[in-house]
Image (tube, grey):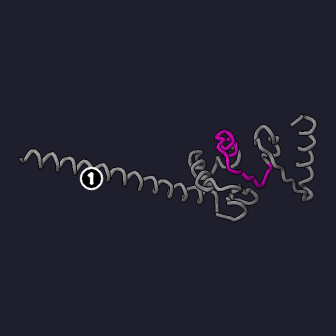
Amino acid sequence: MKNATANELMNYAINLRHIGFTFFLGMQSWTGGVPKNIRINAKLIAVHQTSDIKLLKSVYEECLASVCSFNDFKEFFFKAIDGIKHRFLLIDRVKYPIQLRLNWNIIGDAKEMINSWVTEIHKEKDKEKNKIVNKKRKRDNNINNIYNFKKQK
């Protein structure tokens, strides 16, 4: 964004918000496209499906750093979006505590939602890990049984 245009946009966004004027900006770059003063004052931030970890990290640092760890946010984001076309995570900073929405549907307090979803994700991973461990144990038991059977003969 050119400097003059960025300054005009920033002046409009900051000054006109006092009279209830609302801006909706569609940007493909968070830190490169939106001036910092606008990012700080933004009340609703929609993050669409992306694989750009730098973008997620910059949104996390400016919006959710006080709520959870980056790894928890990243796991939550990818689980929530889940590759579904046109789905987005909406970070709602209009009131405290920060709310999260999937598309426009409220899913709850950011801290509670991320913690509970991440707990569920870890439970699922533990179940998968236990399945693998149990399969290995079963295989090892079968091998031991075969070995013992041959040894007895």
Q: Quadrant of residue 127?
A: bottom left
Q: Tell me if I can see residue 89 in this picture.
A: no
Of residue 81 and residue 148, the one placed in the foreground of this image is 148
Q: Quadrant of residue 94?
A: bottom right
x, y (%) of residue 49?
Answer: 68, 50
For label 1, the residue is: 138
Q: Residue at x 18, y 47 (%)?
A: 144
x, y (%) of residue 89?
Answer: 68, 55
Of residue 153 and residue 79, the one placed in the foreground of this image is 153
Magenta-span inclusion, residue 42:
yes
Left or right placement of residue 123 versus residue 110 in this view: left
Of residue 152 and residue 9, the one placed in the foreground of this image is 152
Q: Tell me if I can see residue 109 in this picture.
A: yes
Placement of the N terminus among the 4 image quadrants: top right
Magenta-span inclusion, residue 149:
no
Q: Residue at x 90, y 44 (%)?
A: 9
Q: Which residue type carries mark 1?
A: Lys
Q: Residue at x 73, y 63 (%)?
A: 104
Left or right placement of residue 148 versus residue 118 in this view: left
Magenta span? 41-60
x, y (%) of residue 4?
Answer: 93, 36
How many labels sit on residues?
Answer: 1
- Relative to 28, does residue 2 appear above or below in the rendering? above
x, y (%) of residue 38?
Answer: 82, 46
Q: Residue at x 21, y 47 (%)?
A: 143
How many neighbours does mark 1 have within 10 angstroms: few (below 14), some (14-19), or many (20 or more)? few
- Kind of element beneath mark 1: helix
Extreme-left residue of the structure: 153
